[in-house]
Amino acid sequence: MPPGVTHVPGLADSILNEIAPLLAAEGIDLSDPKGVDIDALQAALGPAVERRNMELFTPTGAHRTQALAVLRRFTEATAAGRADEAQAVLDGVETDETEDHPAISHVIGVTLGLLDSWYADRRLRTALSSARIASRRRSVRASATDLLAAARRNTAFSSLDELTITHGGLDLFEGGATLIAASISAIAKRQRRSVTATCRELLIADPEYTSVDVVVAGTGRAAETDGTTPADERTLAEFEEWLARQPHIVAPTVEDEATAMRAIFGLARTSGADLRNPHDIETAVDLLVDMGSGEGPDSYDSMMSCLLTLDEYIHFQWEISRRPENWDHAHDIVEDALSAGNGGDRLADVIENATATDPRVRHAALMKTRVSTAVPAFLGWLSTSRAISQSGNLRLVDIEPVAALLGVRAEGVRKLPPLAHALPSGFGTDEPLPEPETLYATSMRDVAVLWAWWQALLQCDIIETTATRVRPGPASGPWTDGGEPPIEDVEALNGLFVSFLLSDRMFDDDQFGSSAAVAVLASRIVIAAAAPELGIENPSDAMSAIRRPRALQVAARLERLGLMSRDASGKLEVPAGLKAAVLRGAMIIMEIVTRSDET
C-alpha cells in the first residue's frame, strides 16, 4: 500500500454516498441496485469520480485563501532555512477542513492548479527550468520529482489520481509544497527579487489584489473588500467595540476606522495573510507600503492612515491577547513603517527623480562606465567556459588579465611577497588611502573591485558557475557581438557593483576600525556626492577621521571606473545618468546596516 494510504472501514460506502447525486445526474439510481445497468454504471463512474475530485480538490473563498497562506508560509520558511518551522506549517494542516483552516486536499488542489498555471506560462519558463527540489525525505523528493514532470507537461491536476496512487496523499501534499517552494525560489532568483515579494505576487487569492481599494481613515472614502472569514469578522467586531471605548482614535468616527480595518484584513487575505496572527502583520505592512508608493496624490495619505489604523489594532491585541508579548515585534514593524513614512523617505524621492532622467541619457552614461565596457571583452575571454577555483572564484592565473579589464593592476600569487600589505604613509585624513602599484592576491576576494564585479555579473545572470567552471549566463546575449543590453540590465549591473564594492569586507575589523562603519561612511560620501540636496555632512568625530581615508579609497575606485566624477572645483559628484544606479547601490548598504542594528 502506498505511503500515506491506510485502510478505512466503510470508506467505499462513504464515497458512493458522496457520488450518488453525481451518478443520478447521469441517470444512475443507486437506491435501486436491481435496476442498475452495470455497463452504464461503469461508464458513469469515471466522470462522477472526476467531478468529485474536482469539488474535493478545488477550494473556493476562504479555504482557497487559507490554502495559499499555508503554501506562502511554508515557502518563506523554507527559503529562510527554517526547516523545522516549514515542517510545522505542513503538520498543522488536517485531513478535514475547519472554519479557519484548509484541508490537505485543498492545499493539494491549489498546488496542482498553480503548478499547471506557472509551468504553462512562457514568461516563467526560463526561471522554472532551474527549479531544484530539496527535501530530507526520499519519498517526498520522489513525489515532487514526478509532480514536476507532470507540471512541465501541464498535466499536474489531471494526474491527481495517478500521483495519489503512486505516492499517497501525504507525500503528494508535502511534495507539492516542496515543489511550490522550489519554483518560487527559482522565479525570485531569476527576477532578482526576494522570495517574500514573489510570494506576494504568485500566492494570492485574487489576481487583481493590487487594485483593492483600502479605506483612507480620516477622509470617509471607503471601499468594500471581500475575503474576510467569519473568524475575521468576530475579531473585527471586537475591535470596533474596543474603539468605541477609546477616548481618541485615528479616524473621525468608530465606523470609519472599523471599515478601514476590515478593508486591511481583506487586502491581507488576498495575499494569504491572517491578521489574527502577529507574524502576518509584516505582510500587511508590505502591502500598504507598496500601495503608498503608487501614483496619485492620495497614495501616501492612504498608506499612512492605514498604518495608523493597524497600529491601533495592535494596541487592541495587546489588551485582549493571552500572550500580548507576541505582538511586540509586529508593533515594531508598524512603528518602523510609520517612522519611514513620516520621514518622507527623501533618499527614495531623490532616486525616483533620478530615474525620471531621459532613459537615453541614463543608458548612454551607464554603457560608458568601466563596469559595463569590460563585459563584452570579458565574455570574449571567457568564450564557452573557463575553469574556476574550488571556492567558485577566478583561478590565481586568471586574476591578472581579468582585473586589467577593470583598470586594476593585480597579480594572483600563492605566497605574498614581503611587505605586500604594508600600509602606505604620508597621506592626510582627507585623502584616499593610496592603492599599491601592484595588488598581490592569494584569492580573487583580495581584489575588491574584481570581486564586486564578479558578484554583480553573477547576480545579473551574465555569468553562471558550476562546481568547476564559469560560463556565459542566460542574460549574456545582449552584451556580446556589439549588442545593446536594455537599460534595466545595465542599471542593475552598475547598481549591484556599487553595493558589492561598498560592502567589501563589511563585517571585518582592522586597524581602521569596523569595516561596517567604513562601508557606512563610504556610502554617505557617495550619497552626498550624488544627492547634495540632502545636505549630508561629513561626521567630525575622531573615529570617522581615522576611517575616512579608506572610505575615500572606495569613492576613488568608483571614480576611476567612471561611476563618479569631479566638478570644476574638484568636488566629487555623480553624473545625472548614473545617479539612480549609484544611489540604489548605496541605499542597499544603509538598509543592511539598519537591519543589522535592529537584530
Image: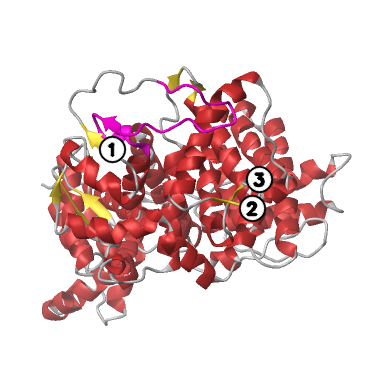
- In this view, the residue in front, 426 or 474, is 426
Mark 2: which secondary structure? loop
Residue 134: tell me if it is visible: no
Q: Does the magenta stretch mainly form a helix, a strand or a loop? A: loop
Question: Of the residues shown, which amino acid type is indicated by label 3?
Answer: Thr
Image spot of residue 88 (x, y percent)? 37, 36
Give the residue furthest to the right.
247
Mark 3: which secondary structure? helix
In the picture, the disc for residue 410 is 1
Sequence-wise, the earlier of marks 3 and 2 is 3
Q: Which of marks 1 and 3 is in front?
A: 1
**Residue bearing mark 2:** 568
The part of the chain drawn in magenta is: 423-448
Mark 1: which secondary structure? strand
Residues at marks 3 and 2, CA–CA distance in whole angstroms? 64 Å
- In the figure, 26 relative to 203: above or below? below
Residue 148: tell me if it is visible: yes
- In the figure, 234 relative to 83: above or below? below
Q: Nearer the viewer, mark 2 or mark 1?
A: 2
